[in-house]
Image (spheres, rainbow, N blue to C red):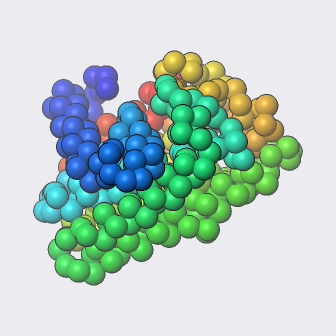
Amino acid sequence: MTNHDVGGNKTESMLREYRRLVEEKLEILMPPAGEPPASLHEAMRYSVLGGGKRFRAMLCLSAHRLFGDPFPEAALQAACSVEMLHAYTLIHDDLPAIDDDDIRRGKASCHARYGEAVAILAGDALQALSFEVLSSCTGPEPSAGLEAVRILSRAAGSRMLVGGQVADIEAEGAAPDGETVRFIHSRKTAELVSASMSLGSVLAAAGPARIAEIGRIGRKVGLAFQIIDDLLDIGGSEKIVGKGLRKDSKRGKITWPACFGADASLKTAERLIDESTAGIRSLGDAEALEYLFRLVIERVS
C-alpha cells in the first residue's frame, strides 16, 4: 500500500495488521494440506493462501471498526469467510468453460495446476467451508450470526453473484449495452463487496438503518471496483494485475468501457468513490474505509 492523504501511515499500519490477522486466521481455518483427500485440501489452500490483496476482508474488518469494533474475533471470522467464498468464485471463473484463464495472482490458476475436476471440487468445498466458518461467528446475539449468513448467501446466489456470472456468459458477443453491463457488474462483483462491509456492521450491531446504508455504499464501491477492473483489462500490466489481460474484447464480453468509453468509465468510478467516501464519513471515524475506497481508483494510476 502506498501513502495516502486519508489516515496516512497510521491507517496503513492498521490495514497491514488486519491483513496479517486474516492470513494467520485463514491458515488456522483451512484444512491441513496432508489431510485426506490431500489433493483437494492442497488445491483449496493453494487458492486461498496463495496471495491476494484481501480487499474484501479488510472492508469487513474496517466496517466493524467503524461501529466500535465490539466483536473483533467474529468480524475476523466473517472476513475469512468472505475470502474463502471469493477464492471459490475465482477458481470457477478461471475454468475453461467460463473465462479460461491459466494465470491467477501471478501464478498458475487452480485448474491449470490441479486439473479441472479437482479445481471444481475445491471451489465447491471452499463455498461450503465459507458458510461453516461464518455460521460459527458469535456476535452481539445469535440473530446477528444468522443475519450474516443470510447476507452472504444472498450475495453468492442465483439472484446476485452466480446470476451475474451467467448473464456475463450469455451476453458474450452481444452489442455493448449499458443496462446489461450494469446488471452484470452490480451482481457479479458489487454485491459481494457490499456484503463484506455489511457483515462487519451486522456483527457490530450497527442497527438496521446504518447496516442498510453500509450496504448501499458497498454497492457503489463494488461497481467502481469492477469498472476499474474493466479498464485494467484494456491498459493494465499482467505483472501488476496478476492475471491474463486483454481477454474481455477477445471473448466479446460486455464491459463498462465498451459501453461508455474509457474516459467516461474512469469518471464514473471516481464519482462513485467520491459519493461512497462522503457517505461513509457521515457514519463515524471512517479513515480506514476511505483509504480502501481510494485504493480502488489508485489501481489505474
- The image position of residue 241, as x and y in percent, is 51, 26
Q: Quadrant of the N terminus?
A: top left
The image quadrant that residue 69 belongs to is bottom left
Is there any visible trace of residue 59 in the rendered image? no
Q: Is residue 110 left or right of residue 286?
A: right
Q: Is residue 38 left or right of residue 112?
A: left
Residue drawn at (27%, 54%) of the image: 29
- The image position of residue 233, as x and y in percent, is 63, 29
Up/down of 130 relative to 9, above or below: below
Question: For this rendering, which residue is in front, 26 or 241?
Answer: 26
Up/down of 108 relative to 173, above or below: above
- The image position of residue 276, as x and y in percent, is 42, 49
- The image position of residue 58, as x and y in percent, is 30, 45
Question: For this rendering, which residue is in front, 100 or 206?
Answer: 100
| Number of marks drawn | 0
The image quadrant that residue 132 belongs to is bottom left
Residue drawn at (26%, 41%) of the image: 23
Q: Is residue 83 left or right of residue 230?
A: left
Question: For this rendering, which residue is in front, 164 or 121?
Answer: 121
Is there any visible trace of residue 144 in the rendered image? yes
Residue drawn at (39%, 35%) of the image: 50
The image quadrant that residue 260 belongs to is top right
Residue drawn at (61%, 68%) of the image: 158
Question: For this rendering, which residue is in front, 119 or 48?
Answer: 119
Up/down of 79 relative to 301, above or below: below
